[in-house]
Image (cartoon, rainbow, N blue to C red):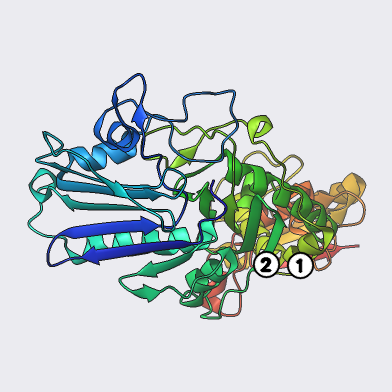
Amino acid sequence: RDKTMDSIKIDIDQENNSISIWNNGQGIPVVHHEKEKMYVPTMIFGHLLTSSNFNDEERKVTGGRNGYGAKLCNVFSTKFVVETASKKYKRAFKQTWEKNMSKVHEPKIKDFMGDDYTRITFNPDLAKFKMESLDNDIVAIFQRRAYDVAASSGCKVILNGKRLTIKNFKDYVDLFLKERGDDGGNPIKFQYEKCNDRWEIAVCPSDNGFQQISFVNSIATTKGGRHVEYIADMLIKHLTEAIKKKNKNGLTLKPAQIKNHLWVFVSCLIENPTFDSQTKENMTLQVKSFGSKCQPSDAFYAKVLKSGVVENVLSWAKFKAENILDKKQSGKKTNKLKGIPKLEDANDAGGRNSLECTLILTEGDSAKTLAVAGLGVVGRDRYGVFPLRGKLLNVREASHKQILENAEINALVKIIGLKYKHKYESYDDMKSLRYGKLMIMT
C-alpha cells in the first residue's frame, strides 16, 4: 500500500452512464515493459493475466491477485479510459479502449512534473447487464462502496464533489447503527477498539442472530470468513466465562448459542488473503497466515461484558429453558398413564369425572401401603396414590435445569396433567387436569 495516498475521488454520472475513480497514490510506472514490449499501464489494464501479485513469497496487504478486476471492468465497458502520472518517471499517460476492449487506441504520453495520480473512467455496457440505464439501486450500491472505502482505507473520500463525513472505521460503525434500533426501539450502543495498525474491531448485541460487517484490505467481505470467526471466537471465550458465573444452575449454553447474540464489525489488513470466489465475499486464509494478531485489551472485553450481550444471552437461555420445560414437563389429560413406577392411578383420572378425583401423596413406600389399604374402603375410582422419596424439591427456588432433571416433579406434572406457565384459577382451567384435588399424607 502507498502510505502517501490520502484522497480518493469518485464521480458517478448517472445520466451519461459514466463512472470515474481517482486517487493521489503513487502513479503507475510510465515505461515500456522490456519483455512484453508495451507500456506498463497498457499491460495492466488491457491484457489478461497480468499482475504484480503472483509472487506468494512477497507479503502484501492488497486484495487482487491475477488482476482480473480491472480487465473485466474494461471488457464490460463500451469505453474505458486510463490516466496516470508519475513524478518519478516525469511522464503522464492516457489510453482509451472501446467496444468491450476490442478497439484499442494508441497511448498518449506527455511530460509531467506534478504530483502522482491515477484515474479510471468507464462507461458500463448496460446491454450486457440487461439494463437501460444506471438505475437508482445500482447507484446506491456504488455509493455504499464509497462509504466502505472511507471506513477501511484511511483516506478522505469525495463522492460527486462532496467529501463524505466518514473519516474512519469507528465513524462507519456509528453511522451504520445510528438508524437502527433494538427490538425495544432503543439506539444500539457498540464497543470499539483499534487493537493495532492492522486490526480494528467493534461489537454490539444482536437481536437477529449472528451478524457481521467486515473488510479485508478494504474489500467488503459480505459473507465474512476466517478473520470474522477469529474475532468472534475470542469474544465468545470471554463471554462464556462471564455467562457461566451468572448462569450456574441454568441451561448449558453452546458457543454457537452465544454467538447468535453478537454483531461483529472487523476491518483488518491480511497478508496475501485468499477468497472462495472472484467476488471476494468470503475470506478463506488460515489464521496462522494472517501476518498479524489481534489482541483486544482487557478494558475492551470489560466493556463488551457490560454492553448488554450477557443479559441478552441469559434472557434467551431462560426463555429456552421455559420452552423445554413446557414441552417435556407439561402433562395432558389422558385416561391411561404409563411409565410412572409405583403410581396407583384412580380409575376416573383423566376422564369426565377427573375433577372429582384426589391424588394422595405419601412419604415413602410404607405410607403408600397404608393409603392403598384405605382404598379398599373408599374405592379406587376417584382416589390415586403416589409415594414421594424424601424431601420434595422446592421449585420456587430451583433453576429450570433442576426442575427439568427432577424425576418426582416430572412425574407429578404428568400425573396431575399440569401445563407449564398455565394458571388454574377457574373451573374451565381445572377441566384439563387429571386430578382436581391433592391430599398430602404426612
Disc nearer the start of the sequence (1/2): 2
Q: What residue type is labelled 2?
A: Gln
Q: Give the quadrant of residue 31.
A: top left
Q: Mark 1 points at which residue?
A: 303
Q: Give the image location of residue 290, x and y in percent.
A: 64, 36
Q: In this view, does 432 lie to the left or right of 28?
A: right
- Type of the residue with mark 1: Lys
Kindly identify which residue carries mark 2: 191
Q: How crowded is mark 2: few (under 14 residues within 10 Å), some or many (20 or more)?
A: many
Could you tell me how far apart the alpha carbons at marks 1 and 2 are, in whole angstroms? 7 Å
Q: Helix, strand, or loop for circle 1?
A: helix
Q: Which residue is drawn at 68% across and 45% down?
A: 233
- Residue farthest to the top? 35
Residue occupying image coordinates x 67% and y 58%: 317
Cβ atoms under marks 1 and 2 closer than 8 Å: yes
Rendered residue at 54%/50% (across/down): 335
Mark 1: few/some/many CA within 10 Å (<14, 14-19, 20+):
some
